[in-house]
Image (cartoon, rainbow, N blue to C red):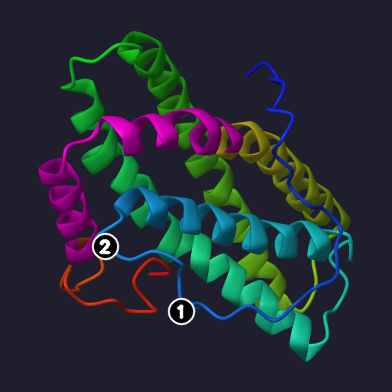
Amino acid sequence: MPIRTPPSNFRLESGGPLMPILIGAKPESDFTDPVGMLGDCHRRIVRFLNVLVSLSKENGKPLSEEHRKLLATSLRYFREGAPKHTADEEESLFPRLRRLDVPGLQTVLTTIDSLEQDHECAVRSHVEVDRLGCLWLTNGGLAPEDASRFAILLNQLATLYLHHIGTEDTQVFPFAAAALSSADRRAIGAEMAARRGLSPTIESGIAAAR
């Protein structure tokens, strides 16, 4: 996949301090604003990815208990939470955008096709990251070749997400927020809630993180 230049106003931090992260922190949006919730999910993706990138710099060495918990939590997010976000987009948001008949739609549809390819690439990488991360937790360390592979995969994911999230946040989501009908927004919110076993009328702090 060619490396694409991200929007100038988007940044993905790397190598920052490791901070405790709780799945379930209250999002800024709720199911009445599904596009806003998707943006909230992006901020979670960036935080968890930054943790994994930072931990990869340990080169597979034994981790402190705090760092083991951060690794386990971040791996679990990408194993359990992030796939719901992908489904929110591919099964709820993107199909409704494809059914619209509004100016500028064709450009957005071309972008969506590319974003779905990104999802496929990310899934493959996350499967391997999860395998290596779980091996690290189980064995207490990684062999040099596994530690190197872990770091390479995460740096590739950081590059992918840098463009992917920036494109969605600056192009697709603003278009969706302006073009979707209130009925579409309600339907998307209801589907997002159902994926998390929740009612769309409940403003739950665990909603988007699940």
**Residue 104 pos. (x, y %):** 35, 12
Q: Which residues are magenta?
A: 166-194
**In the rendered view, does 15 fall on the left or right side of 99?**
right
Q: Which residue ends up furthest to the bottom in the rendered image?
A: 65
Q: Quadrant of the N terminus?
A: top right
**In the rendered view, does 193 fall on the left or right side of 7?**
left
Q: Amino acid at mark 1?
A: Gly
Label 2 belongs to which residue?
Answer: 31
**In the rendered view, does 59 fall on the left or right side of 95?**
right
Q: Is residue 185 above or below residue 33?
A: above
Q: Quadrant of the C terminus?
A: bottom left
Label 1 belongs to which residue?
Answer: 24
Disc tally is 2
> In front: mark 2 or mark 1?
2
Magenta highlight on residue 190? yes
Q: Amino acid at mark 2?
A: Phe
**Residue 86 pos. (x, y %):** 38, 46
Where disc 2 sits, the SS reads: loop
Where disc 1 sits, the SS reads: loop
**In the rendered view, does 178 fall on the left or right side of 202?**
right
Q: Is residue 57 above or below residue 101?
A: below
**Residue 48 pos. (x, y %):** 63, 63
Of residues 29 and 23, the one nearer the viewer is 29
- The secondary structure making up most of the magenta span is helix
